[in-house]
Amino acid sequence: MEMPLQHQIMGYDRVASMFSPDGRLLQVEYAEKMVKKGFASIGMMCSDGVILVANKRNFDRLALPENVKIFEIDSHIAATGSGMLSDARVLIDRAQLQAQQHQVTYDEAVDIESIVKEIADIKQMTTQFGGARPFGVFIIITGINPNGDRKLFVTDVAGNYSSYKATAIGEGDLEIREELEKSYKDDLNVEDGIKLCVDILKKVLKKQFDIRRIEAAYIKTKERQLTRVNLESLKKYSK
């Protein structure tokens, strides 16, 4: 007696390293659904730098400002994630260590794509060997290379990575990307880019939008230094 298809599929979602008969890694697909439930983040390259804008889960007036969703990997590299942020923290810790080791070994700042490859490789390993689940997080990594080049990458749960001018991850990412396609221009500066991202989040999130839950940071090409945008400045961008 042939087993129902649902029962057949269930046997292939026990581990991330086993393909189903129709060529799917079900644990990877489940991890991607986890990302879709994560709060949205936007990355954008601007004419004079790069920016990250993230929607945090909750605003708590008793929370300290150290509770951030945008992380500094090195002074010239920043990252944010959507999905299971505890997974993002582990990967970003590894990226920070690599950046420090590169600086000590070669006496120069690490190239951004080297950091991206390291994170993507770690993610890919969980799809190849048993005993571990995939990392349930997409990560946007952006910054300014030592030669002045602006870079923006996204890594997915399976270990793929792609480069963008502007993109979004997390809840409502398709709607946000549609808005970016309509409004993004290569000559946007950092200030205009942050305002555009805030406006898009306000439009997509509607009643769920709260400026106190928005976090933003940028790295300008000349300074190559991560700068965080305070709440008062964000309120001006949201008007």
Image (spheres, rainbow, N blue to C red):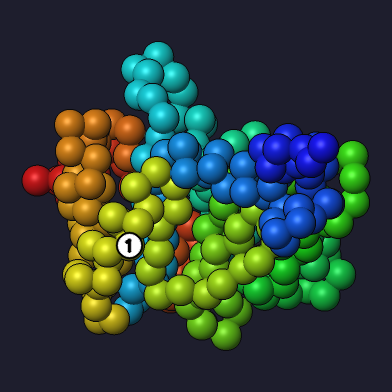
Task: Report if residue 147 is visible in the image.
Answer: yes
Q: Amino acid at mark 1?
A: Arg
Task: Report if residue 88 is visible in the image.
Answer: no
- The residue lying furthest to the front in this view is 1
Asked if residue 232 lies left or right of residue 120, the reply is: left
Is residue 103 positioned above or below 12 on the image?
Answer: below
Q: Identify which residue, 197 or 68, lies in the foreground.
A: 197
Residue at 32% from the left image edge and 39% from the top image edge:
214
Q: Which secondary structure, mark 1?
A: helix
Asked if residue 239 lies left or right of residue 134, the reply is: left
Residue 210, located in which quarter of the rendered image?
Answer: top left
x and y percentages locating residue 7 in the rendered image: 73, 35
x and y percentages locating residue 19 in the rendered image: 79, 55
- The residue lying furthest to the bottom in this view is 147
Residue at 38% from the left image edge and 69% from the top image edge:
166
x and y percentages locating residue 82 in the rendered image: 51, 44
Q: Identify which residue, 219 or 117, lies in the foreground.
A: 117
Is residue 221 positioned above or below 158 on the image?
Answer: below
Residue at 72% from the left image edge and 68% from the top image edge:
117
Residue at 54% from the left image edge and 43% from the top image edge:
33
Asked if residue 104 lies left or right of residue 173, the reply is: right
x and y percentages locating residue 118 in the rendered image: 76, 63
- The residue lying furthest to the right in this view is 130
